Image (tube, rainbow, N blue to C red):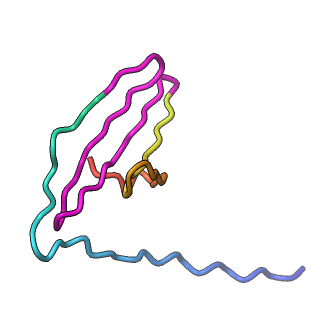
Amino acid sequence: MVAKPKPEPVKKKVVSTTVTNASPKVSKTDQVDIVGKTITKTPITNNGMTLMYIKVEYTWGGKFFFIEDEPNQYRNISQQYYIE
C-alpha cells in the first residue's frame, strides 16, 4: 500500500480594506417586498463613485448578492463582499 502525502494547510490571505482618503458614505437603503422575495438596495459612495449593493432574499431561504458598478450592469458577489 502506497502512503498518500498529507495536504498542506490552507493559508488565509489578509486583505486590507482601509480607505485612505475618506470613509465610504452609505445613502438611504431601499427595501422592496415582492411575493416570495425581499430586495434590499444599498448605495455606497466612495471617492465620488457610487456603487449599488443588492441583496435578494427568498422565502425558501436562498440569498443572493449583487453589485451594480455600471448602469444596468450587475455582477453577482459573495456574501463576504456584500456590505451590510
The segment highlighted magenta reads: 32-60
Q: Is residue 53 magenta?
A: yes
Q: Position of residue 38 (x, y in %)?
A: 38, 27
Q: How would you classify the magenta stretch by its main secondary structure? A: strand
- Please give the name of the residue rendered at 27% of the width and 75% of the height, measured from the top-left corner: 16
Quadrant position of residue 28? top left
Reply yes or no: does residue 45 show up in magenta.
yes
Extreme residue toward the left, this view: 22
Q: Nearer the viewer, residue 75 or 4?
A: 75
As drawn, 81 above or below 40: below
Taking depth in this image into account, of 36 and 73 the one nearest to the observer is: 73
Q: Residue at x 38, y 40 (%)?
A: 55
Q: Is residue 18 above or below residue 56?
A: below
Q: Position of residue 15 (x, y in %)?
A: 32, 75
The quarter of the displayed image where residue 4 is located: bottom right
Q: Quadrant of the N terminus?
A: bottom right
Residue displayed at 44% across by 25% down: 37
Please indicate whether residue 24 sits to the left or right of residue 54 in the image.
Answer: left
